[in-house]
Image (spheres, helix red, strand yellow):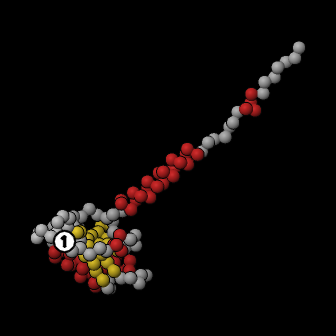
Amino acid sequence: MGIAVRNEGSKINSNINVTPMVDVMLVLLIIFMVITPMLMNKVQIDMVTVNNAIAMPDANKTDAIVLAVTRDGAVFLGQDRIDPSQIGSQVRDRLADRTDKTIYVRADSRSQFRTVEDVIDDVRTAGVETVNLLTERRQGNLEGGE
């Protein structure tokens, strides 16, 4: 009589399959990479619409310096709200190590012109060579004599 020995422990695989986890993580990474630039797109402003808007793709670059003026007169440098008296010093600090001294200004269509003019004056005083005012292109039929 012999004893039947079963060696079932040698058939067990204790390795963890990480392939599904890596797939999920890559999908999440791609989603975040696509959504992050959209979330960084500044303060909510209804910009002025014009017929002959000039495309300024450099304004969408990550290192572009963008000032935003809201309808209530608040001023934002990028995402950060700043005091209007600090515009010159803040812009001067950001331009210190740059060769391209260009600023982009996004103003709400209902903001006071005086506020926008003061922002431009402060930026010019800070040593900015070029100030670009950002607008949106009017949608629809432009030939109909709007």
Q: Is residue 34 placed above or below 112 in the rendered structure?
A: above
Q: Quadrant of residue 53?
A: bottom left
Residue 114 location in percent, x, y? 16, 76
Name the foreground residue: 74 vs 24: 24
The quadrant of the image that shows the N terminus is top right
Residue displayed at 20% across by 67% down = 138
Position of 76 with respect to 23 (left or right) is left
Q: Position of residue 118 (x, y in %)?
A: 21, 78
Mark 1 element type: strand
Q: Is residue 81 left or right of residue 6?
A: left
* Residue 21 in view here: yes
Task: Write the residue at 47% across / 51% down.
Answer: 28
- The residue at the far right in this view is 1
| Residue at position x 30%, y 83% in the image | 130
For residue 9, above or below residue 82: above
Q: Quadrant of the C terminus?
A: bottom left
Residue that carries the numbered disc 1 in the rendered image: 50
